[in-house]
Amino acid sequence: MFNKYFLYSFFLLITSASIAQKSVVQSEKDFYALKTIAIPDNVKLEVGGIAVMPDGRIAASTRRGEIWIIQNAYGNGQPHFSRFASGLHEVLGLAYRDGAFYCTQRGELTKIEDKNGDGIADSYTPVTLFQLSGNYHEYAYGPVFDKNGDMYVTLNVAWVGDHGDGLGKWHGWLIKVKPDGTQEPTATGLRSPAGFMVNSNNDVFYAENQGDWVGSGRVTHLEKGDFAGNAGGLNWTKEPESPLKLTKEDLKQVDNGEPMYEAAKKIKELKLPAVWFPHTIMGISTADIIEDQTNGAFGPFGGQYFVADQGHSKIMRMSLEKVNGKYQGACYPFYEGFASGLVRLRWGLDGSVFGGMTSRGWASTGKAEYALQRLVWNGETPFEMKNIHALPDGFEVEFTLPVNASKLKDAKNYTVNSFTYKYQHQYGSPIINNRPRKIIGMIPSADGKKVKLVLDSLIPGYIHEIRVANLESADQKSLLHDFAYYTLNNIPPGEKTTLQENEKVSMHAGMQHDMKSMPAAKSMVSKKRQTTMPADWIQPDKVLKLGTKPGLKYDVTNFEVKAGSKIRLIFSNNDDMTHNVVVVMPGAADDVASLALKLGLKGSEMNYVPNSSKVLFHTALLQPETSESIYFVAPSTPGEYTFVCTFPGHASVMRGIIKVVP
């Protein structure tokens, strides 16, 4: 009896110790709570702007031209909505200052007041006007106040291409507006500047979306006379008020697909992004930016920035530093799962974040048409990569918590890759020049919260992917997110590290790094893309012709073929954007699209077609004005087989059906 009891107790002791040593896997929701503000059925709150009022009320402007004021938005009672203003034109920005609202409509920056105190606007004063042509993409954003009381607004260019010729004056520009309404054009090269801000140093940053001349999403520091890259706004550089004289003709010398860093050597006005947000890996449509000045009320990221993504309905994080007097830094995942397309972020009075959303016409992973939500930190510190600093010969990675010592110094837990994008007039860019960097040394800090990664080389102008695996904190927390992207515009000056023997990484470990960084084999995918007619065919039984039309659409959405028939599908991409055609099993389109999003740096080279049994046939990823034929035998099982464009951001709307009949 004693022996049985002793053995059972010993078993429990060993089991408990094993469980205690296992890391605790945690999620974003373990640290931040997403709270939804209930919106009345009669309020169509397609949020374009948010303003936080000093008395605790929240104001939201909408794409439908209204401003609503919300009481009890912090969850201290049933929220109450009252309409303050209406009859405006697509209000995509809102600010509150000295008892008045300021909003940017399509053609006007307007001051709005309630002079009789009845809670309804009764004074609409134009501060300044903007020219319009009627192009649907002539969005206007802002205003954002700087420390001097001046306002900034940003104006869109057309959808794609150098179509600025027919747009209203100063579209594609950042404009400073004085209190008296005087406009001061400041910087151009903006394509779709939905999010911008003035930070605590009075510096202006704006977020850009992938498009023509824009390989991927990015955040750029704008100063007077800067050119951010898109050609549309250069129509106005001949105006006497323009702070730069660059022309579209000047861009011809760099419109060759070289990286933007190389183009900037020839175009002195071209401003490099402070941080690239790799397309599909981080997000697909960067939006608002806010700086954390909450003194710790929102977590351990004080002084850093949070960036919204409309298409992925999430918030990303960004850290910045200055090297050689210029901003650069890193982006990190932060929080996913907002209800709709996240456009606006504003700090609440309690240090929480209000997120304003809309998805009408702008597809998003959040399926609601619109929403207003609030993200609140619960006070517990997540285990994260907190910051990344560039060094003369590598990077220093800082964590929010001390790391398990044995794992921190294990070289197999780290990989670094570098890559970049083409600078070109075509829409977007594939990832180019993707290559692993070799880690030759590692130096953990004494407190276990930092590790210095010494590399064999650094490439200025490139994005450096830093991935960590298998790390856990000293108190067994799992790492919440295991990758980040540092934009290395400048290599810091200074002495390179002299490594001690115990700090050097062995050749064996370095080889493991290279293997982990190699792209996945594509043999499985390539078998599903037959671009020449099989030798045993005399001719196809049926030819399907498929094209594109504006608005992320195929020009044909339904085909009918016989089971087992020989098919030639001709796909002609006559759009201005990149597309593919992927035929999948019935009901599998969403799953395949989700897998395509997760391909990371391998996405472009794999045509955004995942290795999945649910994928039947596919074309390559086609550039505008190109075409491809594929040959396949229709499935033998009748049913409705979806064809879909799996380029990230397209799949939710760009699809059709091949009906297979007996």
Image (cartoon, rainbow, N blue to C red):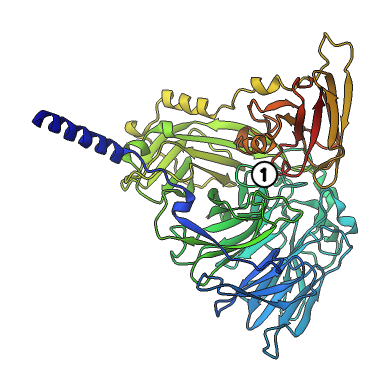
Q: Nearer the viewer, residue 580 or 127?
A: 580
- Relative to 10, is 530 above or below? above
Q: Amino acid at mark 1?
A: Tyr
Name the residue at 80% across, 44% down: 552
Q: Residue at x 42, y 23 (%)?
A: 508
Tell whether 286 sits left or right of 351.
Answer: right
- The x and y percentages for residue 30 are 44, 52
Residue closest to the far top? 536
> Which residue was labeled with disc 1?
261
Location of the C terminus (image quadrant): top right
The part of the image, by quadrant, that contains residue 610 is: top right
> Which quarter of the rendered picture does the N terminus lie within?
top left
* Relative horizontal placement of residue 658, taking residue 371 as reference (left or right): right
On screen, residue 416 versus residue 403, left or right, reads right
- Vertical arrangement, residue 138 with respect to residue 578, above or below: below
Residue drawn at x 72%, y 50% is: 363
The secondary structure type at the circle numbered 1 is: helix
Residue 346, quarter of picture: bottom right
Image coords of residue 364 (percent x, y): 68, 50
Q: Nearer the viewer, residue 496 or 510?
A: 510
Observer able to see residue 150: yes
Using residue 327 as the reference point, say whether residue 438 is left or right of it.
left
